[in-house]
Amino acid sequence: VKREPKLGEEIPEDTLNADKDKGHTDKEENRSFEVVMDNNLDIISTNASIKNMEEDDTSFKMALQVVEDDEKYGFVEDYRYIKVEEDNAIKVIFLDYSFEKQAELNFIFVSIGAYFAAILLVVVLVIILLKPVMKPIKESYAKQRQFITDASHELKTPLTIISTDMELIEMENGPSDWIKSVNNQVERLNSLTNELVTLSRMNEEEIQIEMGEVNLSDIVNDVVMGFEPAIQAKGKKIQVNIEEDITVKGNYDSLERVMSILLSNALKYSDKEGIIQVDLSQNGKRVNLSIMNSVDYIEKGNHDEFFNRFYRSDASRNSKTGGFGIGLAVAKSTIEEHRGKIQVLSADEKSIEILITLRA
């Protein structure tokens, strides 16, 4: 079995001859050589000739570079070296390291290739396997949306008939608390079905609302003016701070509906003689719309659960105000269609703020 020469080991002449007889190449036969210099950096001896190097040229320059670097171990080009200092001489032993370097590079390239191949394989498998898994889920979700839309439309017919019948009864028998109560419930159900249809349509990917440049300052001002009489009638106050001519890319009707939903919630759920505050400002490309109202008590922190459909934090209070817990879900879907962000926050347990962020 052939043994590779160790670092600095001289290769016997008979071994060289035997290897040559076997037809080995020079690169395989001689992987090491040494250069011995005196303290004046003059060459004493070298066997670099076996590497087809000139004694006074390449091998000497390499050895001289090693001595000047003042390092005992290291690399010069494709050679690894060790420097041995004796009393009157400096011996530098070189070992051809090109094969090992190439092997390391090959290993790195193969590893990188295998890594990306594995990622590609995983992606392909996920796409192939996920498609049949997601298909029934998407179909179920589509059927749910379709059911909400169909049910809402089906409810409108009997509600219209009930409302018409109540008008006829009132014309024949005169107004009464009973008739008034039925009409109120019919109105609530009509409002619920309309909101359900709106929410279902907004979640359908194939339906896209038309976007354009709209003046958000005008939208907020118009909605606030519309709510001011109702706010004053309930003995509450509103404070408004709206910067002029703030424009965003969006749909006028959708943003107006969001503003109406938020002010309606603030009016319904603020405490008695409460304060409602509306702020609209722009910072660079960022537009901030804040609707804040005082409350008796609310837990401090983030309240994203308010965006869940039919969410009720206080069932008794919601039954009095007539809320269904759909308005904020509609608002969230609308703002997300405008590539914005909406949050519900409480900083002090005595107020609740709905903060909307849009891009100008």
Image (cartoon, rainbow, N blue to C red):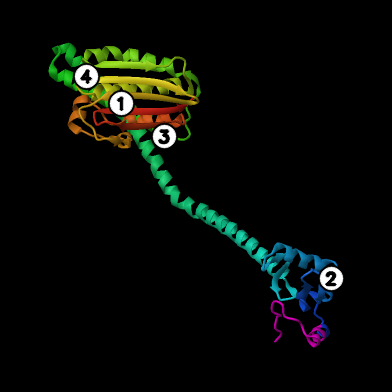
**As rendered, which of 172 and 339 lies closer to the eye?**
339
Instruction: Examine the image and state in which quarter residue 273 appears.
Output: top left
Residue under label 2: 53
Q: Is residue 304 above or below residue 99?
A: above
Q: How busy is the neighbourhood of tag 4: few (under 14 within 10 Å), some, or many (20 plus)?
A: few
Mark 3 or mark 4: whose residue is earlier in sequence: 4
Label 1 or label 3, whichever lies nearer to me, is 3
For label 3, the SS is loop
Instruction: Examine the image and state in which quarter residue 44 appears.
Output: bottom right
**Could you tell me the amino acid type at mark 4?**
Asp
Classify the position of the N terminus by image quarter: bottom right
Q: How busy is the neighbourhood of tag 2: few (under 14 within 10 Å), some, or many (20 plus)?
A: few
In contact (CB < 8 Å): disc 4 and disc 1: no
**Label 4, label 1: how many angstroms apart (C-alpha)?**
14 Å
Q: Where is residue 105 in the image (x, y as percent from the top left)?
A: 67, 63
Residue under label 4: 165
Residue 156's tag is 1
Could you tell me what secondary structure mostly forms the magenta stretch?
loop
From the viewer's perspective, tell me whether residue 207 is left or right of residue 294.
right
Q: Where is residue 190 in the image (x, y as percent from the top left)?
A: 28, 24
Look at the image and give the residue range highlighted in magenta: 1-19
Label 1 or label 2, whichever lies nearer to me, is 2
Tell me if residue 7 is in the magenta stretch: yes
Q: Position of residue 356 (x, y in %)?
A: 39, 28
Mark 4 or mark 2: whose residue is earlier in sequence: 2
**Could you tell me the amino acid type at mark 3?**
Asn
For label 4, the SS is helix
Mark 4 or mark 1: whose residue is earlier in sequence: 1
